[in-house]
Amino acid sequence: MQKRLLQRLEDIGQSLEHSGKALALIGLGSVGLELERLDEHSDLDFFAIVQEGQKAFFLEDLSWLSRLAPIVYTVRNTVDGFKLLYADGIFCEFAVFEGQELSSIPFAAGRVVWKAEHILDTIAQPIQTSKASEFNLEWNLGEALTNLYIGLKRLARGEKLSAARFVQGYALDRVLELAEHLESAHADTWPDPFSRERRLEQRLPMFSVHLPAFVQGYECTVESAQAMLLWLEQHFSPNVEMVLAIRDLIKSSTSSPQSPRAEGFKSLL
């Protein structure tokens, strides 16, 4: 599968070249500079860089891709590109940019698969990069605590989906950022500047053992909140009053007759 993926990408480059309207093809992610992690589950992520005034040509007619192999599904997922599935199982996510647009597009550095002779290799290097916000312990800890609190309040109202998102989504996002400042990431893993959860299990193996307790599902928001609160208390010094307020909500939820796990969970409080 890996060879087929790379060959399809090379074929796309040739198709762009034959169009006479393109400048370059940039492979991204596992078909870019991270080839060592390419496997049978990888997608083809790429940018097609085209001549000025030709963007619509490539977006409105995908024959430059369909002539390579049958396509069974496409969806225009952004103004600049598509997600696409070939009949042979190769999945693509791509965007089309005119050369001058790249200067304002943040992306992780890629690999030049094909380029016109006059184009420099630096076209695969972003001018705009994702701006990593400066780590703020107080802010992250505060957001984690307040999202746990709000989520449990939503649960008390019967808003179970909103509660699950606040606890197992928003609060967890902040816990992940806190974890990155406790455990050094493995050097042989590739961080994703746009998605903190990517390859987390490989990057932070010690922390990731807690994830089953932090993400227990739609019916287990209380248990997930309890596990995250315990972790925060073990590794940081969260505000005592806020911790007590969250614990009160946990107790209220687990003592409610509506909670199927109330009896078994009381021993954890």
Image (spheres, helix red, strand yellow):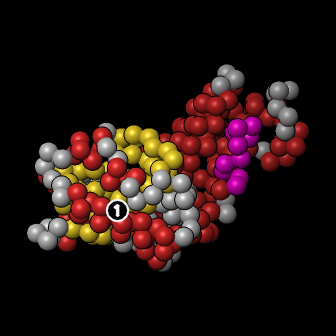
Mark 1 neighbour density, 10 Å: few (under 14) some (14–19) many (20 or more)? many
**Left or right position of 39 against 57:** right
| Residue 213 painted magenta | yes
Q: Looking at the image, is 188 positioned above or below residue 153?
A: below
Residue 17 shows in the view: yes
Whole-percent x, y for residue 147 in the image = 55, 38
| Residue at position x 86%, y 26% in the image | 257
Whole-percent x, y for residue 122 in the image = 19, 69
Q: Looking at the image, is 62 positioned above or below residue 44?
A: above
| Residue at position x 32%, y 54% in the image | 64
Q: Looking at the image, is 84 positioned above or below residue 15?
A: above
Whole-percent x, y for residue 35 in the image = 43, 74
Amino acid type at image mark 1: Ile
Q: Quadrant of residue 152?
A: top right
Q: To which residue does mark 1 refer?
A: 12
Which one is in front, 56 or 68? 68
Q: Residue furthest left?
A: 118
**Left or right position of 4 against 225:** left
Q: Looking at the image, is 223 positioned above or below residue 45?
A: above
Which one is in front, 123 or 22? 22
**Left or right position of 83 against 18:** right
| Residue at position x 69%, y 32% in the image | 249
Q: Quadrant of residue 123?
A: bottom left
| Residue 114 painted magenta | no
Q: Residue furthest front?
A: 67
> Which secondary structure type mostly characterizes the magenta part of the structure?
loop
For numbered disc 1, what is the local secondary structure? helix
Whole-percent x, y for residue 57 in the image = 23, 44
Q: Residue furthest right?
A: 263
The residues colored magenta run 212-221
